[in-house]
Image: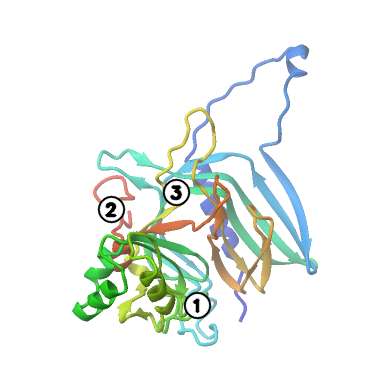
Amino acid sequence: MRPTLGFANTALALLCAGLICTTAQAKMVELADSELSDVTGQAFINLTTDSNAGINYTRINFGMNVETQLNMKKLQLGQYNDSVTRPGEALGSSDILINNFALGTVNADDSINPFKIANPFLELAYSGNKVVGVRIGFGEAKGILSGDIQSLTGNIPVHIKGTADAVYNSANGLQQTALFLGGIYRSSVLEADAQLVASNGAADPVRAGLAGIKNGDGLNCTSGCLPGISDAALALLKSNGCALLGIQTCFSLSQFQSLPVGNMAVNDSAATAAIEGAAKGFFISMQTQDVAWRDMDSNALINTLKGAFMNLPKYRDANGNMVAPININFEQAFNGIPRQDTCLGTATAGC
């Protein structure tokens, strides 16, 4: 199996598209020596190096904030070739396949809600004098990511939180009775962690077509449950085989057509250049062998599999809490998220 590094072209295209969508106005102004002595700064572009386990890294850092709205007919990485595929995966499938991929959205009046990026970078990994990996990443990212998701390989945690009303609506009469007797009511606020899974509910970081509560994990009650009884009930109720009490706990990625990245409820401050509530550590990589990339938020090493890999990890928010980069409610989990408009003009997707 020999995935190629043609992804470098795609990475550059993504990065350049974002940079091109920004605007700048400037002119040369002479500074007196006294004024120049008061000025300090950092290069717009700088290089950093790293090494680990015999692999050397060179990262090109772009010290800037970007606001972009871009569309791509197909984001397809890690298909390799017709005769070679990953063991256990369908012939012709891809590590990452998202049709009508888009960042940012468009309103009815053609005004734009941009996808916001801070400190984008492009990084190469070398083993000896051979390039074995390339990744494009964002120090911070916030906005709507849209697409018809067919398969994903990587690390993409999702947090589900909301009232149990949607859970009741997806349950039959017997299941609803069991929930009620367990001290869980329609108004109860529940939460759960989800991730990429296989159809049997096992964690599946490779070419997954589903996201859900993995086997052995369950629900937690935040408020509105019957103390003691609900705690005991939830401690016993764990997802298994993509079901909990017979209620579905795994969902097709294709039904999530527009996903919020970062905390969309937090508004940016006009007084600063910070992206408030941004997710941290987002990158897409391609490697010809397993490669450990440096996380830009925690500085930890993230192990990625040979092929294409998308990393959208949990990160530390402004209060120091570890939070998921994608947060949805139970109604969205059961019923999906419709695509928001990403095209100028009449088309909403595939423009």
Cα–Cα span, label 2 and label 1: 33 Å
Vertical placement of residue 264 versus 183, above or below? above
Label 2 is placed on what type of residue? Answer: Thr
Of residue 158 and residue 238, the one placed in the foreground of this image is: 238
Cα–Cα span, label 3 and label 2: 24 Å
Q: Say whether residue 267 is left or right of residue 61.
A: left
Taking the spot 51% from the left edge, 27% from the top edge, the residue there is 271
x and y percent of residue 106 in the render? 32, 45
Earlier sequence position, callout 3 versus callout 1: 1
Vertical placement of residue 45 versus 201, above or below? above
**Circle number at residue 263:** 3
| Label 3 crowd (10 A; few <14 / some 14-19 / many >=20) | some
Of residue 228 and residue 152, the one placed in the foreground of this image is: 228
Task: Give the residue pinned by disc 2.
Answer: 348
- Residue 5 visible somewhere in the drawing: no
Instruction: Say which quarter of the image contains residue 118.
Output: top right
Label 1 is placed on what type of residue? Answer: Ala
Residue at disc 1, secondary structure: loop
| Label 2 crowd (10 A; few <14 / some 14-19 / many >=20) | some
Label 3 is placed on what type of residue? Answer: Asn
Task: Give the residue pinned by disc 1.
Answer: 203
Earlier sequence position, callout 3 versus callout 2: 3
x and y percent of residue 190 in the render? 36, 63
Vertical placement of residue 56 versus 229, above or below? above
